[in-house]
Image (cartoon, helix red, strand yellow):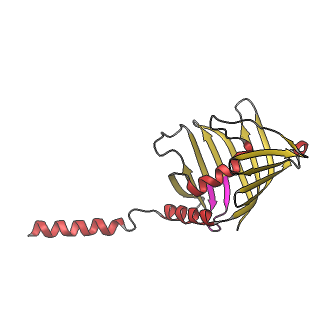
């Protein structure tokens, strides 16, 4: 009888210790933010993008406007391409200026370009497979890492996202290909609707 009582008490303690099935505060926040991003119809932000091709690195500053299926990115720097607008609808990506279309070239074998980086980061926020998450900077920032659930760390495409823990605004995103960071995107003035 005593063994049975000890077993019941141990089981009760184990179940009570599990709480919310072992979900951490960071995981709860990540899931709440994911729900908000899935529900939003659009967003606007300023973004500074660094695209690293290995032998060359390019830096861009742009205005981001997402409305439903359409994403518009208007470059403000470098000055030589200021005013250039990238429009993406569904699977179509165009870089246009005064009716002229330009291709920027892929950063990886999946066709990632500086133009498609912002939509890729937003898609990761909505549906990327979360491999890890943690609160950083004394709980002010949530970091969410996404990747292939069957892949190994450092292989394939991996995404890291940082959100303001209070406002849930996306503040930074990185995309790595086979362990090499190819995109760094820092956001400011992020608003969603």
Relative to 17, residue 113 above or below: above
Quarter-of-image position of residue 106: top right
The front one of 92 and 66 is 92
Q: Which stretch appears magenta?
A: 162-172
Q: Would residue 179 appear left or right of 95 to someone viewing this image?
A: left
Q: Is residue 182 above or below residue 67?
A: above
Residue 42 can be seen in this image:
yes
Taking depth in this image into account, of 90 and 45 the one nearest to the observer is 90
Image label count: 0
Q: Quadrant of residue 99?
A: top right
Quadrant for the C terminus in the image: bottom right
Whether 164 is among the magenta residues is: yes
Q: Is residue 192 magenta?
A: no
Q: Residue at x 70, y 51 (%)?
A: 118
| Residue 108 on image: x %, y % | 65, 35
Q: Position of residue 20 (x, y in %)?
A: 40, 67
Q: Nearer the viewer, residue 100 or 108?
A: 100
Residue 140 shows up from this direction? no
Would you say 190 lies left or right of 83 here? left
Write the residue at 74% across / 35% down: 105
**Which x, y percent locates residue 88?**
74, 50
* In the image: residue 23, left or right of residue 59: left
Find the residue positioned furthest to the top: 55
Image position of 35 with respect to 182: above or below: below
What quarter of the picture does the N terminus occupy? bottom left
């Amino acid at each position: 009888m005593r063994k049975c009582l000890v077993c019941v008490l141990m089981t009760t303690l184990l179940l009570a210790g599990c709480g919310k099935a072992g979900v951490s505060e960071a995981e709860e926040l990540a899931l709440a933010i994911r729900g908000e991003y899935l529900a939003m119809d659009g967003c606007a932000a300023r973004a500074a993008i660094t695209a690293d091709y290995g032998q060359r690195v390019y830096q861009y500053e742009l205005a981001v406007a997402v409305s439903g299926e359409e994403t518009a990115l208007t470059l403000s720097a470098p000055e030589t391409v200021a005013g250039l607008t990238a429009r993406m609808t569904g699977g179509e990506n165009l870089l246009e200026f005064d009716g002229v279309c330009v291709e920027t070239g892929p950063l990886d074998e999946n066709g990632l370009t500086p133009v498609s980086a912002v939509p890729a980061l937003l898609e990761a926020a909505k549906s990327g497979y979360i491999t890890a998450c943690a609160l950083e900077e004394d709980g002010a920032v949530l970091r969410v890492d996404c990747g292939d659930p069957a892949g190994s760390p450092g292989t394939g495409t991996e995404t890291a996202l940082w959100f303001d823990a209070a406002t849930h605004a996306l503040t930074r995103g990185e995309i790595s290909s086979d362990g090499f960071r190819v995109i760094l995107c820092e956001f400011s003035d992020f608003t969603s609707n």
